[in-house]
Image: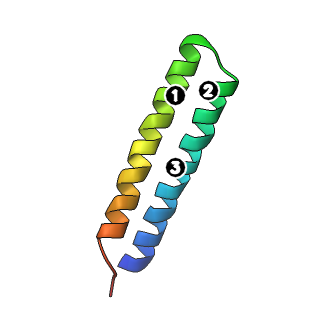
């Protein structure tokens, strides 16, 4: 697998984490209450941070040959 294809799959994982984070945040705000909402929100924000780090890495790694 070439470096370009690997970067593509890594970026898909990052975008997927951002989508999962968005869904979990909405779910925890509107459907859950109490401690469970806090746990789901924490997982969502962790996914958001990891997704953002992955996307930032891909963007700043530049073009591939």
In terms of depth relative to the viewer, which is nearer, 7 or 38? Answer: 38
Q: Quadrant of the N terminus?
A: bottom left
User: Dot 1 lies on which element?
Assistant: helix
Find numbered disc 3 in the image and state the secondary structure of the residue it sits on: helix
Asked if the residue at tag 2 contacts the one at tag 1, i.e. Cβ–Cβ closer than 8 Å, the answer is: yes
Asked whether residue 26 appears in the rendered view, the answer is yes
| x and y percentages locating residue 17 in the rendered image | 51, 49
Q: 1 and 7: which one is in front?
A: 7
Q: Measure the alpha-carbon separation of dots 1 and 2.
A: 6 Å
> What is the spatial separation of the Cα atoms under label 2 and label 3, in whole angstroms?
15 Å
Q: Say which mark, if any, is on residue 18.
A: 3
Q: Position of residue 40 (x, y in %)?
A: 54, 26
6 w.r.t. 48: above or below: below
Q: Residue at x 58, y 34 (%)?
A: 25
Left or right relative to 38: residue 55:
left
| Circle 2: element type | helix
Q: Residues within 10 Å of mark 3 (few under 14, many from 20)?
A: many
Disc 3 to disc 1, how far (Cα)?
Answer: 13 Å
Percent x, y of residue 47: 46, 41
Q: Which mark is residue 28?
A: 2
Q: What label does residue 59 carry, if any?
A: none
Residue furthest left in the image: 61
- First in residue order: circle 3 vs circle 1: 3
The residue positioned farthest toward the right in the image shown: 31
The answer to whether one can see residue 1 in this image is: no
Query: Which residue: 40% across, 60% down?
Result: 55
Residue drawn at (46%, 64%) of the image:
11
Name the residue beneath numbered marker 1.
41
């Amino acid at each position: 697998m070439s470096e370009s294809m690997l970067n593509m799959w890594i970026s898909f994982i990052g975008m997927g984490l951002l989508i999962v984070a968005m869904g979990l945040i909405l779910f925890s705000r509107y459907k859950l209450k109490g401690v469970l909402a806090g746990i789901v929100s924490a997982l969502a924000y962790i996914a958001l941070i990891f997704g953002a780090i992955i996307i930032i890495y891909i963007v700043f790694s530049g073009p591939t040959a």
